[in-house]
Amino acid sequence: MSAKKPLFRIQFVSNGERYELFVRECCQGSMFGFVEIGDFVWDTHTSVVVDPGHEKLKSEFADVTRTYIPMHNVLRIDEVKKQGVAKITELSDKITAFPTPVYTPKK
């Protein structure tokens, strides 16, 4: 019996937008302060309706095998049983981005 890889839903903030992606690999990573994700899982649309947000995500991560997200940008990581739809949404007033940069050098 082969063990199936877990499926993760990761939500993070980048450039004023909230990203929600589904991946098979998620770990702390070898770079300090970053979450490493890889093995992206994309929904294969069987209907005629095409979601432009989903297509934007697919094209943005088309040639990416792994990406590193700063820990302070991660909102949530869930291990899920079923895949949902990857999407990008505008940040609402309820989500406040962590102040950046975390470290400001003295002048």
Image (tube, grey):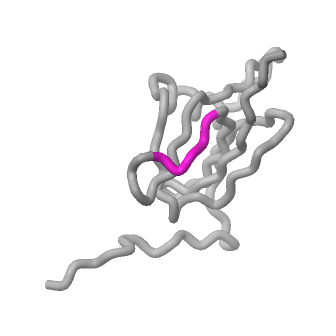
Q: Is residue 22 above or below residue 59?
A: below
Say which of 98 and 7 sits in front: 7
Q: Is residue 36 part of the magenta span, yes or no?
A: no
Q: Is residue 11 above or below residue 105?
A: above
- Number of on-image labels: 0
| Residue 84 x %, y % | 80, 36
> Is residue 27 found left or right of 46 in the rendered image?
left
Say which of 105 and 53 sits in front: 105
Residue 45 placement: quadrant: top right
| Residue 3 x %, y % | 78, 24
Say which of 72 and 3 sits in front: 3
| Residue 32 x %, y % | 40, 57
* Quadrant the N terminus occupies: top right
| Residue 56 x %, y % | 57, 33
Say which of 5 and 13 sits in front: 5
Q: Main secondary structure of the magenta part?
A: strand
Residue 58 placement: quadrant: top right
> Is residue 16 found left or right of 47 in the rendered image?
left
Question: In this picture, which residue range is highlighted in magenta?
Answer: 25-29
* Quadrant the C terminus occupies: bottom left
Q: Residue at 79% of width from left, 17% of height from top?
A: 2
Q: Is residue 32 above or below residue 1?
A: below
Residue farthest to the left?
Answer: 107
Q: Residue at 68% of width from left, 41% of height from top?
A: 87
Q: Residue at 47% of width from left, 46% of height from top?
A: 29
Residue farthest to the front?
Answer: 1
